[in-house]
Amino acid sequence: MIKIALCDDEAKILDEVSSYINKYAEKKSNQRIEISRFDSAKALDFALDESSFDIFVLDVYIGKEMGTALAKKIRKRGIESPIIFLTTSVEHAPQGYETGTLRYLIKPIEPKKFYEAMDAALLQAEKIAEQLIRLKTENGIESINANHIMYSEAHDHYQHITLNNSGSLKVRMTVSELYSTLAKNGGFVRLGSAYILNLRNIKNLSSSEVLLYNNTTIPIPRGKYAELKKAFWDYQCEG
């Protein structure tokens, strides 16, 4: 099931785009799509507290609110889902591309271009889904993008996970169990008996400590610097 958030303050546009999405789903006979419609940026932002979406279709002008500002809020939540903008002008395109906007579609919307944008969005959403892992946390089962994990630290039979959007998770599993789950996605390394690091988030290495992009420093156990340095550079070369 692909969940799409559609946000526009004009009921006519909501109906029109919903129709295009339904026709697109019919063409993709094996693809189930669910549409959630919002007539304000505030309503969609509020919904994100309870729901997740695979694709966002946003108007650039949502009443008095800017869709580009909404897109920034979406990204600040750590959500990487593709965003398609609907607009009468590409004047605000530079602001949109700061949030990794997938497409800008000029109104009136051409069905062919909309379907092409949906093809690209689905492809991107599938790639993001491949990075999702499910973890049993204090708040129940949560699906998170492995790329959003900055590092984890073991404490009293729990792994305390720090995310790169300043969030955190606490899971009851061993370091080995968590590392086994994360290693399937690549880009992770164990550091001593307590830490698992996301190599994507290493800002600097010295012989004694690791500096992450959130300015956290983690001590490197004696004799492990060369091993960590090799893992880091191997990952950089692969990327």
Image (cartoon, rainbow, N blue to C red):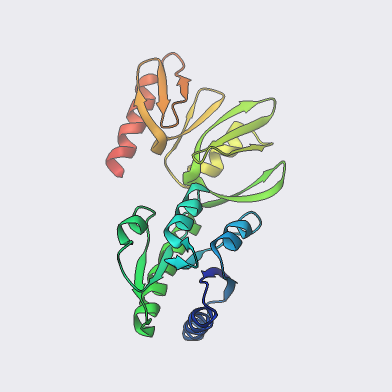
Quadrant of the rendered structure where residue 175 is? top right
Position of 157 relative to 166 (above/below): above
Check the picture and name the quadrant holding the C terminus: top left
Quadrant of the rendered structure where residue 206 is? top left
Relative to 128, 203 lies left or right: left
Quadrant of the rendered structure where residue 179 is? top right
| Residue drawn where x is 43% and y is 63% of the image | 83
Check the picture and name the quadrant holding the N terminus: bottom right
Picture coordinates of residue 12, whole percent (x, y): 51, 83
Of residues 127 and 68, the one drawn nearer to the viewer in this rendering: 68
Q: From this viewpoint, which residue is outermost toward the left?
A: 237
| Residue drawn where x is 36% and y is 32% of the image | 231
Picture coordinates of residue 199, whole percent (x, y): 40, 35
Of residues 218 and 66, the one drawn nearer to the viewer in this rendering: 66
| Residue drawn where x is 53% and y is 48% of the image | 77
Relative to 18, 88 lies left or right: left
Position of 216 relative to 122 (above/below): above
Relative to 209, 25 lies left or right: right
| Residue drawn where x is 62% and y is 32% of the image | 159
Picture coordinates of residue 5, whole percent (x, y): 54, 68
Of residues 127 and 16, the one drawn nearer to the viewer in this rendering: 16
Picture coordinates of residue 149, whole percent (x, y): 51, 40
Of residues 86 and 199, the one drawn nearer to the viewer in this rendering: 86
Report how many numbered discs are placed on residues in the image: 0
